[in-house]
Image (cartoon, rainbow, N blue to C red):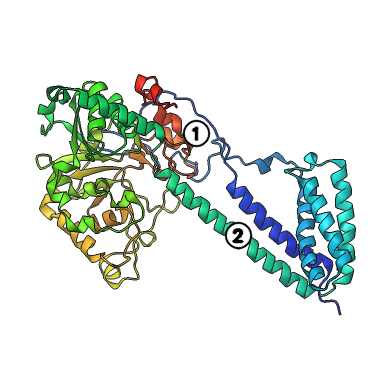
Amino acid sequence: MFCLSMQKYKAEIQKLSSVQQEIEKDLKEPTITLYKNGSFENAGGIDRAGSEKNHTRSGVKGQSNQTIVGEGNVHPQFQKVSDEKVREMKDQVIRARAYLKFASQHKNSQLVKELKTWIREVERALGGASKDSDLSRSALQRMGSMEGTLSKASRIYTDCSAMVEKIRAMTSNTEEELQAQMNQATYLFQIFGRTTPKGLHCLSLRLVADYFDLQPEKRELLNQHKLRDPDLYHYVLFSDNILASAAVVNSTVSTSMEPEKIVFHLVTDALNFPAMTMWFLLNPPGRATIQIESLDNFEFLLSNSLLKKQDSLDPRYTSLLNHLRFYLPEIFPALSKVVFLDHDVVVQRDLRGLWDVNMKGKVNGAVETCRKDHLSFRRMDMLINFTDPIIAKNFDVKACTWAFGMNVFDLREWRRQNLTAVYHQYLEMGKGRQLWKEGSLPLGLLTFYNQTVALDQRWHVLGLGYESGVGRTEIERAAVIHYDGHMKPWLEIGIAKYKPYWNKYIMFNHSYLEQCNIHA
C-alpha cells in the first residue's frame, strides 16, 4: 500500500528549498542608501538639563523604531519578479539527488545514469539564474526532461516514508553545513573588525617618525594649564586609533557653542603615544585643549594583578584601555565630573547640557536599553549569568540595562561610594567562573547597579556598527551617534549609509592620509 502521494513528499522538498532561500536571503547585502550631510538643527528638545520637550520616548509620534520605510530597508522581493521556474528546477535537482541515493543502493544503473545526466544538465541550465527571465528556452526543455525521469523514479520507488526520511536527512545535513559556514563567516567577520587597516599602520609610522624628529620642547601640546580647571567641560577618551580619536575630538569641538571651554583627556598605550601626540600637534583642536597621556603613566594599573588575569581571545577585552573607565577617579583626581566618550562615536550636538543633568545622588548618567521596542534592547540575563546564586541573590534580572559610549560620571560620588573597590570585588568573584559575557558592559552593569540615572534617549543613539535598522530621523536628532558593533566606519566592512556621518569629521585631504591611501 502506498503511504504518501508524490505531492506529499514534494511539499517536504519545498520546505528544504524555503529554508535555503531564507538563509540565502539573510546573507544578501542590504540595499545601500547614501544620505547627504545636511545641516543638523536643534536636537528637538535637548536642553541644558537634558529634559524632554514635546517628545515621545519612542521617537516621532506614530513612528515605529523597528523599520523605517525609505531608509534602505526595502528588499528585492517587493519587486514582483517571477522566479517560480527557477525554484522548481532547484526542487527537481534536490528530488533527483534523493532518488539517486536509492537508485545507487539498488544498483539500478540505467536510472542512475539518467538522474546524473539530468542533474548535470539542469544545474548547467540554471547557472546563476535568480529569476525566470534569466532562463533560456533550452532550460525549460531540460526541465521537462528531468520531470520525466523523476516520474519514472517515482514509479520505481514507491516507498514514500523512506523517501521523506531521506529528504529530511538531506535537509538536516544542508542546514548543518550552512550553519557551519555562517558561523565561520561570523568568526571571520569579527576577526576583520578587530584588524587595523594598512592605511592606519602607515599613518602611525609617518607620525612616529615625525615625532622623534622634534626637539623635546616642541612635543608639548598647548594650554596644558587648563587640565584641572573645574569650571571647564572635561571629556575623557581612551583609544589607540588616531582617526577614531580625531573624529570624536573634531565633532565635539565643532558642535560646541563654547569650544574654548572644552578639555579633552585622551589616554592611549605607550606604542601609540608618539603618533597620537604628533597628530594633535599637527592638527590642534581649534580653541579647545587636549591632553594626551600614556598608560605607562599609571603604575597602579600596570601592577594590578586582577587586570592581568583577564582571560579572553579578543584583545579588546584584555586591553587595559578597555578597563580604564573603571578607574576614572584615580586617573583624574582633581576632577569632579566628566563626560566619557567611546572612540567609535560622533558628536552632533552641543553637549554642555550634560553638566547640568540632575544626577540624583547617582554616579553614572546613561541612556537606557531595556525597552523591548528599542533597537538596542538588552536584558540583564543576556549579559549576566543569573543561574549563579550570588548573582541571583544580589541583582534583579528585571533591572533596566543601559549603554556605555556616552556617559556622565560624578567622580565625587564615585569616590565617596568607592565603586572602584566594588569593581575589584566583581573581578575577583569572576575568576574561574563564567558570571558574565566578555566586555566592559556586564561589569559596568554590576558596578553601577542602582547607581545610574537615565538620560533622554536623544542624547545617545546606538546601532550604527551593525545592521540594527536605526533610521535617518533617529540618527539626525541624536546628540551622539554610536558605531557599536564590528562594522566600524573606518573599516571597509562599515555600513555605507552610516559612514558619511563619521567621514565629515575626517580630513581626507590631509597629505598624510593621501600618502597612506586613506580615503572616504
User: What distance separates the C-alpha of mark 2 from that of mark 1?
Assistant: 32 Å
Q: Are marks 2 and 1 in contact (CB under 8 Å)?
A: no
Most foreground residue, 460 or 518: 518
Q: Position of residue 85 (x, y in %)?
A: 80, 48
Give the labeled residue for mark 2.
177
Q: Secondary structure at mark 1?
A: loop
Instruction: Please state which of residues 303 and 46 is positioned toward the viewer in this rendering.
Output: 303
Tag in front: 2 or 1: 2
Which x, y percent locates residue 31? Answer: 58, 37
Residue shown at the point (89%, 52%) measured from the top left: 144
Near-viewer residue (126 or 351): 126
User: Which residue corresponds to the image point at 48% horizontal and 39% vertical from the top-left?
Assistant: 493
Q: Residue at x 10, y 52 (%)?
A: 416
Residue 256 showing in the rendered view? no
Task: Say what secondary structure mark 2 lies in.
Answer: helix
> In the rendered image of this protein, does residue 237 appear above or below residue 174?
above
Question: What type is the residue that disc 1 sits on?
Answer: Lys
105 w.r.t. 237: above or below: below
Which label's residue is closer to the chain start, 2 or 1?
A: 2
Q: Image check: 86 left or right of 252? A: right
Can you tell which quarter of the image residue 114 is in?
A: bottom right
Q: Which residue is mark 1?
A: 497
